[in-house]
Image (cartoon, grey):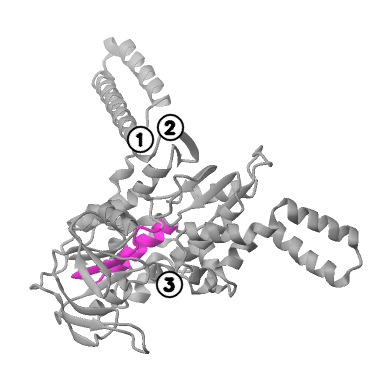
Amino acid sequence: NGAGKTTLLRFMSHYEIEKFPRHVRMQHVEQESASKLSLVEDSVLSVVLAADYERTLLLAEEKQLLESNDNPERIHKVHERLQQIDSDSAESRARTILAGLQFPESVVDGPAKALSGGWRMRTALAGALFMSPDLLLLDEPTNHLDLETYPKTLIVVSHDRNFLNQVTTDTIYLAKQQLSYHRGNFQSFENTQEELLKNQRKAYEAQQMKVSHMQEFIDRFRCNAKKAPLVQSRVKALEKIMRTAVEEPEDPRAFKMNFPPPEPLGRPIISVENVAFGYGDGRPELFHDVNFGIDMSSRIGILGVNGSGKSTLINLMLGKLDPTHGKCVRNPRVRISTFTQHHVDSLDLGKTAVENMMELFPGHEPDEFRTHLGRFNLSGELAMKPTRKLSGGQKSRVGFAVLTWRLPHVVVLDEPTNHLDIETIDALIDALRNYKGGVVIVSHDQHFVNSICTELWVVGDRKVTRFQGSMAEYKKAILNE
């Protein structure tokens, strides 16, 4: 995070890199592409069609020319160009792309602003695919998209191991303002990096041992006149080594996060008994006769298709909604914290991480917050930077610091890996494995869920059922339905 991946894609898409080939047609689907659609009144289909700027402008010009009817030569040229770009088939092509991205027909003709973030991102991708660019740039796409069969060149920034291993043929690593190129998918790259790190570590340790022996000799015989030539020789040799010294290799996996432990509570700390729930107004019941319990050792992944009721289930657990039948019982002493992208987005960007926490939890000293932020690798300068200057992943780490400040007995995480780099995801996995409270996760990241969750609950058909299998098996079962 913060290495410059998003900036690099933007420079490419704007042709701002020297000697970048101008004839290459590009489409860039950014992280912000989805949020831009939240205010769009047009239908999903219209948004996709509008991605072809040339066609949109030609159709507008055609309408204007036909109304005035005073330039038949230009009308002919416009019609000719519309034929060349196959304008008449545009709508059917757009509908085919949207169907391929699993958009229901009713959604295709509905307003884009009514879509959730994930579906808005798919809409932005549909617009890019509609343009059929030579090079498609994707920054953190929704990771359940089937891009293995994409027939042209794809450059993707993603943190999802499974997605990268299934889709990519080459890996570009950006670190310290340098790009290094590797044949193979992420797993292949990771294996190579591990071997490289091991060799760098050996070379560094051998060098340090040699330096130590030389320095010891110099210190021991510095004042011995008989040994002066030997000492001088060692000093020169040491200076030469230091000029070309191997730097101590940085292991990105050395980054750690630490969720502080809460005091223990008796089990279950949350109990859902014979619960039914519906929003009324003639809408069908979402849940019927649901039963489960959560304790401090729970590691639960909640799965289900969009609109199945995952968010509603969490709101029932948190007490934000009351069941229409049955009861949700929470230990009176239980503290539950939730993490969503909304919580991260609601941080005051003009304030530092410390100032944000002081505002959220008044009555504490700044040093207490600095110490706590240090658990999430946000110490020193990072804790005192305005939040707007932090990368997406660093902002998420501020979110995790907020999440754990009150020492919750249960943490509920909704898509927590969004905007995190792979090293931070690994650190979060370790932190949650070692955490002494209960964990409930909603996530599409297969590696993340499989690494933490011991139970998978599937929400659908008015039920919450335990799935006997892995997340990969669940996805396969959904595709086969």
- Residue at image point 25% right, 78% down: 287
Asked whether residue 398 is drawn in magenta, I would say yes
Label disc, if present, on residue 10 of the rendered structure: none
**Residue carrying label 1:** 188
Q: In this rendering, is residue 72 above or below 240? A: below
Q: In this rendering, is residue 441 above or below 312? A: above
**Residue carrying label 3:** 346
Q: Residue type at mark 2? A: Arg
Q: Earlier in the sequence, mark 1 or mark 2?
A: 2
Q: Are marks 1 and 2 in contact (CB under 8 Å)?
A: yes
Residue lying farthest bottom?
281
Question: Badge 2: few (under 14), some or many (20 or more) residues near its Cα, within 10 Å?
Answer: few
**Residue carrying label 2:** 183
Rendering coords of residue 407 (x, y %) = 21, 69
Select label 1 or label 3 by which is in front.
Answer: 1
Rendering coords of residue 443 (x, y %) = 32, 61
Q: In this rendering, is residue 284 above or below 34? A: below
